[in-house]
Amino acid sequence: MQLRPLFLAALAGDGAAYRRFLDIIGERLRGHLRHMLARAGRREPSEVEDVLQEVLLALHLSRHTYDPASPVTAWAHAIARYKLVDHLRRSGRHVGHLPLDEEAFGLADRPVAAAAEARLDLDRAMASLPERTRGLIDRVRLQGASIAEAAVAAGMSENAAKVAIHRGLQTMAKFLSRGGGRPG
């Protein structure tokens, strides 16, 4: 089942298409989350459902950030990765060693060009940030460090680091929603 047409119909106001999209993407993400949580030594079915609900809520709240020219599954899986990392961090599990890349999330069969373009967009969004903010986001969101660890490395207070990360992620979201700096 192609999810992109369903999601585009949902964005246009088709409630039935939106419910169908959420059902299908929920099933797909449930399997991936189960697998990734098991790799982290977590096998409770309720934990999978908790993370899945966070992901589905984030998808709903972030639906305005979706770029219709991009694969909807890659967008959904990116949100799932962030929610999984957040969940593991909150539960005291260090996530730096987990393979949270596209291959681990079953996206390796997506067109290489789309993945390369998405990576280029992410790189451009990161490059648009001040160096200190870029370093904080890299340490916390990509390397799995705690905010406290990243703050120490950046020579700033934990609260200042939280604010910088939050503002940096907002700036990146705006940058990406405008097309990632791509001409056109």
Image (cartoon, grey):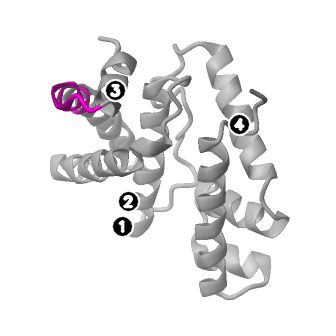
Q: Which residue is mark 1?
A: 91
Q: Are marks 1 and 2 in contact (CB under 8 Å)?
A: yes
Nearer-N-terminus badge (1/3): 3
Mark 3–mark 2 Cα distance, whole angstroms, equals 26 Å
First reached walking from the N terminus: tag 3 or tag 2: 3
- Point out residue 141 in the picture as x, y percentages from the top left corner: 59, 57
Asked whether, in this view, residue 47 is left or right of residue 119, the answer is left
State the CA–CA distance, disc 4 to disc 3.
21 Å
How many numbered badges does the structure rendering display?
Answer: 4
Q: Residue at x 61, y 77 (%)?
A: 163
- Residue underneath mark 4: 121
Res. 92 visible in picture:
no
User: Pointer 2: what residue?
Assistant: 87
Magenta span of residues: 13-22
Rendering quarter of residue 130: bottom right
Rounded to the nearest angstrom, the CA distance separating label 1 from label 4 is 31 Å
Please say whether residue 28 is visible from this viewpoint: yes
Q: Residues within 10 Å of mark 4 (few under 14, many from 20)?
A: some
Nearer to me, 131 or 16:
16
Residue where numbered disc 3 is placed: 7
Judging from the image, what secondary structure is the residue with disc 2 in?
Answer: helix
Per the image, is 35 magenta? no
Left or right, 156 with reference to 80? right
Q: Position of residue 42 (x, y in %)?
A: 30, 51
Residue 135 versus residue 66 in the image, above or below = below
Indicate whether 162 appears above or below 171. Answer: below
Task: Report if the CB atoms under discs 4 and 2 are less than 8 Å apart.
Answer: no
Q: Which quadrant of the rendered structure holds the C terminus? A: top right
Whether label 1 touches label 3, CB < 8 Å: no
The amino acid at mark 3 is Phe
Cα distance in 3D space between marks 1 and 3: 32 Å
